[in-house]
Image (cartoon, helix red, strand yellow):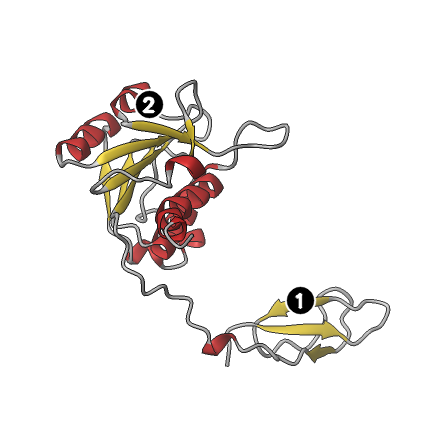
Amino acid sequence: MPSTLFFECSNPDCGFRFPAPPGMAACPRCGSLLRLVPDTSDLATVNPRDEITASHPLEALLDNIRSTYNVGAMFRTSDGAGLTHLHLCGTSPTPENPRVGKTALGAEFSVPWTWHANGLLAAQQIKAQGKKLWALEIGPNSTSIFQAAVTLPDGPLCLVVGNEVSGIDPGILALCDARVWIPMQGYKRSLNVAIAFGIAVYTLRYTPQVHTMW
């Protein structure tokens, strides 16, 4: 039995419809009896795993991310996109903080990670290993990530994302081989860092192989 089911209140004046653990009997809104919503989905037979082996190993450096929930969400995205390592730098919380697990939902145990007190030193070490650093940061020399991802550099790539307010440490930014940004259509100039991270890593992971299909 699934851990949650969908219920609907039997009171027509209420009609509250929501997911909850099995065994719930009364509507939390009006106290009336609940009806179990029939499950007609076939999700149990679907396997979302992509068996294609990535040609470009991808990891990320999280520079002074302040929110445990953002870091947790980035762990979950990293697991889904097959990132090989997360470098947590400075004030970026680690999975040792239980609040990271609230949004990581177990991905904090499947994605290798390292904490570094000094993000600049970590970036220097990554470059010394022959990996390219791409900064997710808007600026005069930034390229749309949707254009840049069509032709990725040879070898491993590390995406750098910065603090929710301050952005990427200028010393780390100076080390980066390229700067990429996500085009915006509205009033705001940027997205939540965890959302931007998700768009970026999936773009870097799948754009090259999709492009070769055309």
Q: Residue at x 15, y 32 (%)?
A: 125
Q: What is the x, y in percent for residue 180?
A: 40, 31
Q: Secondary structure at mark 1?
A: strand
Query: What amino acid is found at the position of numbered circle 2 in the picture?
Result: Asp
Task: Answer left or right for 178 relative to 166.
Answer: left
Name the mark on residue 79.
none
Q: Determine which residue is flagged by label 2.
A: 169
Say above or below: 55 vs 45.
above
In the picture, residue 136 is in which quadrant?
top left
Query: What amino acid is found at the position of numbered circle 1 in the picture?
Result: Phe
Name the mark on residue 18.
1
Say above or below: 41 vs 208.
below
Task: Answer left or right for 197 relative to 30.
Answer: left
Say above or below: 170 vs 65.
above
| Disc 2 crowd, CA 10 A, few/some/many (<14, 14-19, 20+) | some
Task: Answer left or right for 202 relative to 59.
Answer: right
Task: Answer left or right for 57 relative to 8.
Answer: left
Q: Residue at x 20, y 42 (%)?
A: 155
In the picture, residue 123 is in which quadrant?
top left
In the picture, residue 109 is in which quadrant?
bottom left
Q: Residue at x 72, y 70 (%)?
A: 27
Alpha carbon separation for disc pair 2 and 1: 43 Å
Looking at the image, tell me whether mark 2 or mark 1 is earlier in sequence order.
Answer: 1
| Disc 1 crowd, CA 10 A, few/some/many (<14, 14-19, 20+) | few
Say above or below: 113 vs 124.
below
Query: In the image, which is nearer the foreground, mark 2 or mark 1?
Result: 2
Badge count: 2
Q: What is the x, y in percent for residue 111?
A: 28, 53
Q: In the current view of this chain or complex, which residue is farthest to the right?
A: 13
